[in-house]
């Protein structure tokens, strides 16, 4: 009835606003006028004034109050009672005690402990979610999918949330207790744990380790010495175990999808409906002016020394469902939460909850962190060319580039759902531009002079200049262009593409094309340049011309990151001083296939076959398969793979014994020091019996 059967162990786990049963036996027969008086307490220095303690009597009928107990049946020396907490009760671990009404208070007898959670099934709870299918997906599903990649090449990655695994609930409660808010003032902190706004904000700070002994330490560049490559994590359970067993030492290392996966586990475990959301072409607006300013040189290469803003290929955060009593009912529903440590909020690396509705309507003046989230999905993208004399000119302005294909897993299936319309009106529409201007007015209407000073310092431009840049599009040049892949880009093979340029005018155009390419992180930060060349061409009136471009495997093999991404750029210098910047993000492809050889049944051996391929044109002799999956494997399974010849495919078979029924996710990674890891997953339906 409480939807808590999946929590392991003997501890009672219940949800607020819903009754649970107690059977009590007494050492003597109760008198007819005697009844029971219960006490529930949570946190240190439990107090009735702070609602961390409640004393209440068992009555023969229901009544409205805070906590309540109803006497269901009574025999000579036993009684059956139902107890329920109010729908706004503080969540956490409680002590329960009781006494017979005729006894003195000091005769309270300890009856045990229980854990109280948020209740999405209770219509009076702020986290109430009306649809049962959504509750099953966003609260009870212990596995999911996180979308990564680039806007035009989105890939699904399996993730094991594992909120019902052994000790995970205890660890999630420990995260709350380790927060600075609790360490500084535990009494006040616990008293606020009835509010999902408060709890979720604390969790968004504690999942990263920047200001506290939080769970995950982020790292985006360099080697992952002394820790785990973020791409090698397959779920939250191993991370949470490592943090807890390591005495709250931050786990190395995480990136955005890891932070989001862990936070989803914690919030689902505590009873808040939560999902993972991926935003493609996601803005990181450092100077908080609702525009992303990128500075490049004459080859289109990003100038990192002066570029503070950035546009990530993708960024992953969470949405949780609850009411916003602090903002008003029109802002109820999905709330953005982000545990990735990007910018400080109120002096702490935390983000949200920000109402998705508020973001769509441009209400960036509301709590919490609206301007930052709004910019992530709807900032304007402006590219500046720094000339040799250090002057700067705007060469590209795009109001539609940021916030593409905002995605989450569908309810009840593994398909991708595009929820971009939840965050903004259609790009290019009049309404979208109205909302953008509204956000600008709201943002700069508060402490305007201070914000204008920050803009001037960050950009080297005045307020009027910045205003014109973000609200007026750049002049379009008289040519257009794009990169086109001639063959699928595969790890270990040469990359073949072409830049296609078209003259839009009826006169001859002379164009100098400066080409560059670099291996990049998913944050689009360059790692190493792998291409640098120039071409001069003539375009006849309305002519289209192709320039072939080839990047050999030998040029990128040493510098390719685990993200498997390459950014190709072309700065086209047209006669009469016009300039056109063309960019393309390339994600290299790989291969892995998983299938089961028979029906999956709890407690019975199941054969699994994995087909892998060596993507290289050289022998790979250090490959390992790593498998993981809640309900399928109790611990990680590692299998060494025999040496693979160039381009060779091989089949690897192994056996598992499922121990939980339902839809279970098996994750399989192929790991090698010779190429970035290759990931795959398979959803397996496990039956209780044949």
Image (cartoon, grey):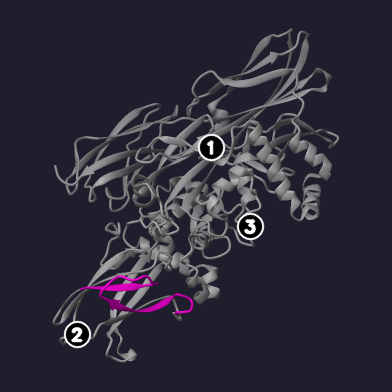
Q: CA distance from mark 1 to mark 3?
A: 25 Å
Residue 68 lies left or right of residue 88; in this view the side is left
Residue 684 location, quadrant = top left
What is the span of residues highlighted in magenta in the rendered image?
48-72
Q: Position of residue 164 (x, y in %)?
A: 32, 56
Which label is found at residue 291?
A: none
Which label number is shown at residue 420? 1
Q: CA distance from mark 2 to mark 1?
A: 63 Å
Marks 2/3 in contact by CB < 8 Å: the verdict is no
- Judge depth for marks 2 and 3 and give the one in front: 2
Q: In the displayed structure, would residue 595 be above or below residue 251?
A: above
* Residue 344: mark: 3
Residue beneath disc 2:
32
Q: Residue 124 falls in which quadrant of the image?
A: bottom left
As helix, strand or loop, the secondary structure at mark 1 comes to helix
Nearest to the eye among marks 1 and 3: give it: 1
Crowding around mark 1 (Cα neighbors within 10 Å: few <14, some 14 to 19, many 20+) is: some
Question: In this rendering, is residue 667 above or below 14?
Answer: above
The local crowd at label 3, few if under 14, some if 14 to 19, many if 20 or more residues have their Cα within 10 Å, is some
Q: Secondary structure at mark 2?
A: loop
Q: Residues within 10 Å of mark 2 (few under 14, many from 20)?
A: few
Quick check: can you spot residue 525? no
Q: Earlier in the sequence, mark 2 or mark 1?
A: 2
Nearer the observer, 260 or 546 = 260
N-terminal of the pair, mark 1 or mark 3, is 3
Q: Residue at x 75, y 51 (%)?
A: 445
Tell me where residue 340 appears, x and y as whole percent: 55, 52
Residue 172 makes an appearance in the image:
yes
Q: Magenta stretch: residue 67 in it?
A: yes
In which quadrant of the rendered view does residue 414 lie? top left
């Amino acid at each position: 009835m409480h939807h808590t059967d999946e929590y392991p162990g003997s501890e009672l786990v219940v949800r607020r606003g819903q009754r649970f049963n107690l059977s009590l036996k007494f050492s003597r027969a109760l008198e007819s006028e005697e009844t029971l008086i219960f006490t529930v307490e949570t946190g240190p220095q439990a107090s009735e004034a702070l609602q961390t303690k409640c004393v209440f009597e068992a009555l023969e009928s229901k009544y409205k109050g805070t906590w309540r107990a109803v006497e269901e049946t009574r025999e000579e020396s036993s009684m059956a009672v139902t107890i329920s907490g109010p729908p706004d009760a503080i969540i956490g671990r409680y002590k329960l005690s009781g006494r017979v009404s005729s006894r003195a208070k000091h005769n309270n007898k300890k009856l045990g402990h229980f854990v109280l959670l948020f209740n999405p099934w209770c219509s009076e709870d702020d986290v109430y979610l009306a649809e049962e299918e959504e509750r099953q997906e966003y609260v009870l599903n212990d596995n999911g999918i996180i979308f990564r990649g680039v806007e035009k090449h989105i890939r699904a990655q399996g993730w094991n949330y594992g909120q019902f695994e052994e000790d995970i609930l205890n660890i999630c409660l420990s995260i709350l207790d380790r927060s600075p808010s609790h360490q500084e003032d535990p009494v006040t902190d616990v008293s606020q744990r009835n509010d999902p706004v408060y709890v979720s904000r604390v969790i968004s700070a504690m999942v990263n380790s920047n200001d506290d002994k939080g769970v995950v330490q982020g790292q985006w560049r360099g080697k992952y010495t002394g820790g785990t490559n973020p791409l090698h994590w397959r779920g939250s359970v191993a991370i949470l175990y490592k943090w807890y067993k390591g005495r709250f030492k931050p786990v190395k290392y995480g990136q955005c999808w890891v932070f989001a996966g862990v936070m989803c586990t914690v919030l689902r475990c505590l009873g808040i409906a939560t999902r993972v959301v991926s935003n493609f072409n996601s803005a990181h607006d450092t100077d908080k002016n609702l525009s992303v300013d990128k500075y490049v040189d004459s080859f289109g290469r990003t100038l990192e020394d002066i570029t503070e803003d950035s546009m990530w290929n993708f960024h992953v955060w969470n949405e949780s469902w609850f009411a916003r009593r602090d903002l008003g009912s029109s802002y109820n529903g999905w709330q953005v939460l982000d545990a990735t440590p990007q910018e400080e909020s109120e002096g702490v690396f935390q983000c949200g909850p920000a109402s998705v509705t508020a973001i769509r309507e441009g209400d960036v003046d509301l709590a919490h962190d609206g301007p930052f989230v709004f910019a992530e999905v709807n900032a304007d993208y402006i590219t500046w060319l720094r000339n040799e004399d250090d002057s700067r000119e705007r060469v590209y302005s795009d109001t539609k580039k940021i916030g593409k294909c905002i995605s989450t897993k569908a309810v009840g299936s593994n398909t991708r759902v595009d929820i971009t319309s939840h965050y903004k009106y259609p790009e290019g529409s009049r309404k979208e531009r109205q909302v953008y201007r509204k956000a600008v007015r709201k943002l700069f209407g508060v402490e305007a002079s201070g914000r204008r000073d920050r803009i001037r310092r960050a950009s080297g431009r005045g307020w009027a200049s910045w205003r014109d840049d973000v609200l007026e599009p750049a002049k379009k040049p008289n040519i257009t262009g794009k990169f086109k892949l001639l063959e699928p880009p595969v790890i270990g093979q040469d990359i073949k593409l072409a830049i296609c340029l078209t003259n839009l005018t009826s006169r001859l155009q002379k164009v100098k094309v400066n080409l560059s390419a670099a291996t990049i992180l998913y944050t689009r930060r360059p790692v190493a340049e792998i291409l640098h060349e120039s071409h001069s061409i003539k375009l006849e009136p309305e002519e289209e011309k192709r320039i072939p471009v080839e990047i050999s495997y030998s040029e990128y093999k040493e510098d390719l990151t685990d993200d498997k991404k390459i950014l190709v750029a072309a700065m086209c210098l047209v006669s009469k001083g016009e300039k056109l910047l063309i960019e393309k993000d390339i994600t290299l492809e790989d291969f892995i296939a998983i299938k089961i050889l028979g029906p999956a049944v709890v407690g019975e051996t199941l054969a699994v076959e994995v087909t892998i391929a060596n993507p290289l044109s050289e022998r790979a002799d250090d490959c390992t398969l790593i498998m993981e999956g809640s309900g399928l494997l109790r611990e990680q399974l590692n299998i060494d793979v025999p040496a693979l010849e160039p381009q060779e495919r091989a089949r690897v078979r192994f056996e598992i014994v499922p121990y939980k029924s339902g839809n279970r996710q098996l994750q399989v990674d192929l790991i090698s020091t010779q190429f970035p890891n290759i990931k795959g997953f398979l959803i397996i339906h496990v039956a209780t019996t044949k």
